[in-house]
Image: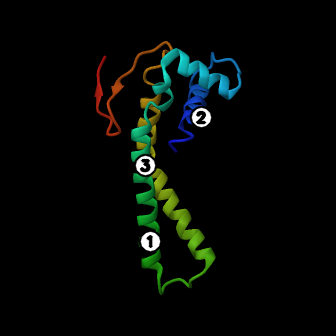
């Protein structure tokens, strides 16, 4: 995640800013670094890593809990594990989506898109009103 995070920053910028003309990804990386500093490419990395840890925890905890619960009830098979993994994935997405929304807001909060919003300090969503 740390290595490829600048590419995620470019992707997010392209999705949010519809005035951005189509350019090579590396050109956009260079423009962001020159205009806003290299740190802009990594804005929000800390909360993303926290969210990734939380997401993996939810997924694997749920998967192993479902697997332990189903032992003896369902026959062991790849199909059962695929089903349990899918259910764990659904639970993970529903429970961690708010974290990913805050991550996107943190990443985008300092770019000028013509509107001002709240300033997020971290993943929990504490913000400073403008």
- As drawn, the label of residue 96 is 3
Q: Sequence order check: which comes first, mark 3 or mark 1?
A: 1
User: Is label 3 or label 2 in front?
Assistant: 2
Toward the viewer: 47 or 104? Answer: 47
Toward the viewer: 113 or 86? Answer: 113
Residue 123 lies in quadrant: top left
Residue 77 lies in quadrant: bottom right
The secondary structure type at the circle numbered 3 is helix
Q: How is the image coloured?
A: rainbow
Q: Position of residue 78 (x, y in %)?
A: 62, 76
Alpha-carbon distance for marks 3 and 2?
A: 22 Å
* Residue plotted at (41% across, 16% down): 116
Alpha-carbon distance for marks 3 and 1?
A: 18 Å
Toward the viewer: 74 or 17? Answer: 17
Q: Is residue 29 above or below residue 34?
A: below
Toward the viewer: 108 or 74? Answer: 108
**Side (left or right) of 121 relative to 97:** left
> To which residue does mark 2 refer?
7
- As drawn, the label of residue 64 is 1
User: Is label 1 or label 2 in front?
Assistant: 2
């Amino acid at each position: 995640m740390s290595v490829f995070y600048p590419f995620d920053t470019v992707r997010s910028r392209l999705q949010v800013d519809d005035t951005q003309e189509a350019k090579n990804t590396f050109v956009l990386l260079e423009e962001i670094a020159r205009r806003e500093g290299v740190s802009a490419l990594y804005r929000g990395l800390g909360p993303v890593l926290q969210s990734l840890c939380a997401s993996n925890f939810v997924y694997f905890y749920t998967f192993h809990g479902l697997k332990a619960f189903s032992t003896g009830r369902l026959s062991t098979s790849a199909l059962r594990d695929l089903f349990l993994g899918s259910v764990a994935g659904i639970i993970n997405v529903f429970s961690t989506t708010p974290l990913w929304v805050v991550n996107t807001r943190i990443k985008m909060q300092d770019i000028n898109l013509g509107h001002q919003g709240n300033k997020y300090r971290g993943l929990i969503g504490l913000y400073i009103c403008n």
